[in-house]
Image (cartoon, rainbow, N blue to C red):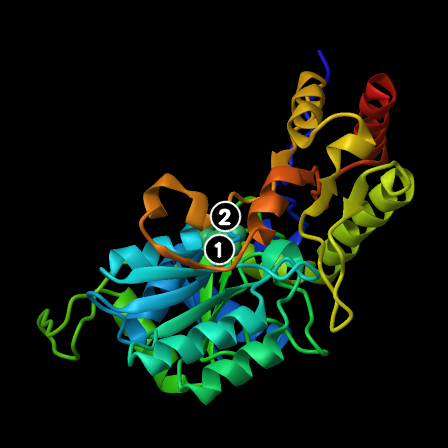
Amino acid sequence: MKKPILLSTPHMSTRELDFVKEAFATNWIAPVGPHVDAFESEFCQVTGAGHAAAVSSGTAAIHLALRLLGVGLGDEVFCSTLTFAATANPIAYQGAKPVFIDSDRTTWNMNPDLLREALEKKAQIGKLPKAVILVHLYGQSADIEPILAACNEYDVPLIEDAAEALGATYKGQSPGTFGTIGIYSFNGNKIITTSGGGMLVSDNPELVARARFLATQARDSAPHYQHSQIGFNYRLSNVLAGIGRGQLQVLGDRVAARRRNYEVYAKELGDLPGVEFMPEANFGTSTRWLTCLTIDSEAFGCDREQIRLALAEQQIETRPVWKPLHMQPVFAECEFIGGEVGADLFTSGLCLPSGSNLTDEELERVIIGFIDIHNSNK
Ligand SMILES: *Cc1c(COP(=O)(O)O)cnc(C)c1O
């Protein structure tokens, strides 16, 4: 039986364990402590963010962002449709309604023209959204400038979901640092991980201070436990922040390794008929968190799902591209603005094993497996 090759697995370096040991040695085994503070400030240095609050997950960071922006019952929030459900679930936590926006074919991310048209229409009926959540998918930044310009024109705050795009650039700057609030994830499958964790960033220090307050049960300053608002238990553990500090030191290496995976795949598979890799927009650098491609089944000889299943038989894990949220049963009633771009990418799109710790032998197994499927379906 062959060893399984997984999509994206944790990849520790040498420093993480030192930081964890330090947490044990000093007994900072709590959702507060020196690693949490250092992780936040080091994260700001790496991304150029103004201020940062370390939290228990990317999902928690999105939830806090919506709370900070006053999203509540019956409000609408615009949201990229081609993404993981965690982007939109916190909209529902707040009793608000997502309005999903389709992708642009060249970036796979939110189409700026659709956003602008939708804002214009909503302005006409006096029902502007309370916020826009923009996702930077698979390590590639969305085209932020026109999106931010549209948001600014209608005075709607922008939340950037950069969970998959830590280490990427947009015109030389980190996606996640352009909007009112940005969020990142350190889940086990992301480019760097704390096993579970997230970060909320903003240039506005008051928003970040309020995020920390809400994330620690909204305790008023009083010697007794006093609360005048509903809070959450969303802070990151000091132990996990230690892992994050070690991971942050090798972020550049992790980006380089994932980009190399893509380059090897593109070189070896890019000329097969019907195979097209996710394009890299010219405004920045993608991390290629996951290497994604689309399959034209007529040209290739079989469809995306047949490829996925055939690779699975060889213990190679691949995944379809995210199923757009407007197609998810749980969001079936929600408004959707756009056409078939996200739906087409879902139907034809496949994510290949992309971990920064993949060996050359593993890459070769995926490549040979993929070429074999093509040859046997010609
Ligand atoms: C992983 C992910 C999240 C959620 O992050 P968690 O840390 O797992 O809660 C949100 N949005 C996107 C696009 C993601 O990929």
Q: Which amino acid does label 2 sit on?
A: Pro
Q: In which quarter of the image is the N terminus?
A: top right
Earlier-in-chain disc, 1 versus 2 = 1
Residue drawn at (19%, 65%), measured in percent from left and top? 73
Residue drawn at (80%, 22%), measured in percent from left and top? 373
Dots 1 and 2: beta carbons under 8 Å? yes
Q: Name the residue under label 2.
A: 324
In x, y percent, where is residue 46? 63, 73
Residue drawn at (8%, 72%), measured in percent from left and top? 224
Q: Mark 1 points at which residue?
A: 81
> In what element is the residue under mark 2?
loop
Seen in the picture, residue 232 relative to 181 is either above or below; the reply is: above
In x, y percent, where is residue 378? 86, 21
Q: What residue type is labelled 1?
A: Thr
The number of numbered badges drawn on the structure is 2
Residue drawn at (48%, 55%), measured in percent from left and top? 81
**Toward the viewer: 78 or 179?**
78
**Toward the viewer: 14 or 278?**
278
Quarter assignment of residue 358: top right
* Direction from residue 344 to residue 372 in the image, left or right: right
Report if residue 62 is visible in the image. yes
**Toward the viewer: 90 or 98?**
98
Crowd class of label 1 (few under 14; some 14 to 19; many from 20; radius 10 Å): many
Q: Is mark 2 within 8 Å of ligand 1?
A: no
In x, y percent, where is residue 104? 63, 62
Q: Does the residue labelled 1 lie within 8 Å of ligand 1?
A: no
